[in-house]
Image (cartoon, grey):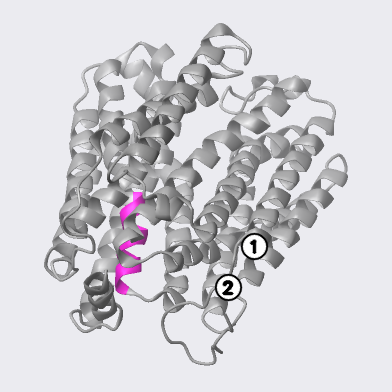
């Protein structure tokens, strides 16, 4: 343990890496993360074109679902693998798997092969989400690390905006396969950038091994749960045999995975990490926050079109307020963490502010003008965005270097799972009021004459944020490692 801590200290103090090399690594991993994030959003506008070209349009949802399943399930595995075998080979493996999936997708002769390619892409993309934050965690001490989390939020915002624009342009004016071909040169560029400097990062947890059985149980449990969340209410009723069966089998696999964690000589996810109260509360807050944010982002355009009266393209532009507000909140939080003692309060105030704004949006849902909606959604994003840097840094600061990858993997995993839960949760509210599910098109929106369903959606999202606030309140706060000017030492 002492040897691992010493190695981490060497990296944190910058001895083995120059600032240029650090910046090169961060630029390279952010580029690879951008590719993975883009492929979550770039496909949607091209799906009609793909369905026309390849046929079997009824399987189009699997282009998105296949990527989501493997990306979410694989995220915690990459954290453990990188702790054992080192960041460089694991990052390279994730990029190469992602590029292989891109190649298969670009050359797909039919829908079945395309879905397989997307699943392969997700298997690599899930690792890139985890490893980007883990590598940054290796390079920068926690107190200074917060400002880089704003770059990660910015990367997600760019992907959310640029993805649909690129996907629509390629499909309409060029060829849909360019959506996947473009990944090849960019992925190789990312590998070239990080190749040499990444060799200097030490392996934090040598003489360890991967629990293969535990990994299989986790992947199976996650995949079945995500299928149930994706299909429930859309493909099948929530109380149908299919959905209840998926949930029951998933529960069995989760129980087997929990038993494996207790009995394995070296479990996939260390009990020391899972039992850490900071990790538990921090990851729970991100899980709940992401559920509220993604669910809101999915149904806010429906509200803007049916109640405010915007067109599809106008509602897309109006969504920029929520995205840019989130990036601004993360940036503000990242800068403040370095200079305050009780850094947890930044996120607590931010989440409370977002909750109040969502409550106000629910109250005025039937009469609010576009400027009012924009101001409130910007404020929601601004407040919730403060949580991601605080939670990420708190979780990474709470574990030793040997478990940094595992802890970051768990955080990424629950953030992705929260996204799926949020869409399913607010989708259930929408169905209860007779609204069309997001993604089913807007043809039925003309039938919506009341703002009551949207007010309830906003209230449910606000309640979810309140639960995230409770998790933050319960999260212990310890001093962050690393030096920063004007940062007083916090008493134990």
- Look at the picture and state if 414 lies above or below 335: above
- On the picture, is 196 further left or further right than 288? left
What x and y, as percent, mark residue 56? 36, 11
Q: Is residue 437 shown above or below 6?
A: above
Q: Is 371 above or below relative to 149?
A: above
Judging by the rendered image, the residue that carries numbered circle 1 is: 382
Check if residue 281 falls in the magenta segment: no
Q: Is residue 363 left or right of residue 119?
A: right
Whether residue 448 sits left or right of residue 162 in the image: it is right
Q: CA distance from mark 1 to mark 2?
A: 9 Å
Residue 424 seen in this snapshot: yes
- Residue 42 can be seen in this image: no
State the extent of the magenta-drawn residues as a range. 129-139
Q: Residue at x 57, y 12 (%)?
A: 236
Q: Nearer the viewer, residue 1 or 75?
A: 1
Which structural element holds mark 2? helix
Secondary structure at badge 1 equals helix
Name the residue at 56% across, 27% down: 439
Q: Identify the residue at image location x=28%, y=54%.
A: 32
The residue lying at 32 percent from left, 43 percent from top is 267
Magenta: main secondary structure equals helix
Task: Look at mark 2 in the image and give the residue it sits on.
Answer: 332
From the viewer's perspective, tell me whether residue 483 is left or right of residue 181: right
């Amino acid at each position: 343990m002492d040897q691992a801590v010493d190695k981490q200290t060497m990296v944190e103090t910058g001895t083995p890496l120059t600032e240029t090399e650090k910046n090169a690594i961060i630029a390279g991993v952010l580029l690879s993360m951008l590719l993975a994030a883009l492929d979550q959003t770039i496909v949607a506008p091209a799906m009609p074109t793909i369905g026309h070209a390849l046929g079997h349009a009824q399987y189009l949802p699997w282009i998105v679902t296949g990527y989501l399943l493997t990306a979410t399930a694989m995220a915690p595995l990459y954290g453990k693998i990188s702790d054992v075998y080192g960041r460089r080979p694991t990052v390279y493996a994730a990029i190469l798997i992602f590029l292989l999936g891109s190649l298969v997708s670009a050359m797909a002769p039919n829908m079945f092969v395309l879905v397989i390619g997307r699943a392969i892409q997700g298997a690599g993309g899930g690792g890139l989400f985890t490893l980007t934050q883990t590598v940054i965690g290796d390079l920068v001490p926690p107190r200074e690390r917060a400002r880089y989390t704003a770059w990660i939020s910015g990367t997600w915002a760019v992907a959310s905006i640029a993805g649909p624009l690129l996907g629509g342009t390629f499909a309409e004016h060029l060829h849909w396969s360019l959506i996947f071909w473009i990944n090849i040169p960019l992925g190789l560029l990312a590998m070239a950038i990080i190749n040499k400097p990444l060799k200097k990062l030490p392996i934090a947890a040598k003489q360890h091994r991967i629990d293969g059985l535990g990994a299989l149980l986790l992947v199976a449990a996650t995949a079945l749960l995500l299928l149930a969340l994706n299909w429930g209410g859309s493909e099948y009723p929530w109380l149908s045999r299919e959905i209840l069966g998926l949930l029951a089998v998933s529960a069995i696999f989760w129980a087997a995975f929990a038993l494996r964690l207790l009995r394995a000589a070296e479990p996939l996810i260390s009990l020391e990490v899972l039992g850490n109260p900071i990790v538990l509360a921090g990851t729970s807050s991100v899980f709940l926050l992401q559920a509220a944010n993604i669910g809101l982002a999915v149904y806010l355009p429906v509200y803007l079109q049916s109640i405010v009266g915007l067109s599809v393209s106008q509602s897309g532009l109006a969504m920029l307020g929520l995205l840019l507000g989130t990036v601004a909140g993360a940036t503000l939080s990242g800068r403040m963490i370095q200079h305050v003692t009780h850094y947890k309060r930044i996120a607590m105030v931010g989440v409370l502010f977002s909750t109040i704004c969502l409550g106000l949006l629910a109250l005025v849902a039937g009469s609010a003008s576009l400027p009012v909606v924009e101001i409130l959604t910007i404020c929601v994003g601004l407040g919730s965005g403060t949580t991601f840097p605080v939670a990420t840094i708190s979780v990474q600061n709470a574990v030793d270097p040997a478990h940094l990858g595992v802890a970051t993997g768990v955080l990424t995993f629950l953030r992705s799972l929260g996204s799926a839960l949020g869409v399913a949760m607010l989708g259930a509210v929408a169905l209860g009021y007779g609204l069309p599910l997001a993604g089913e098109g807007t043809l039925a929106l003309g039938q919506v004459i009341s703002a009551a369903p949207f007010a309830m959606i906003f209230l449910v999202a606000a309640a979810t944020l309140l639960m995230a606030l409770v998790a933050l309140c319960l999260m212990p706060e310890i001093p962050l490692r690393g030096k920063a000017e004007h940062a007083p030492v916090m008493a134990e």
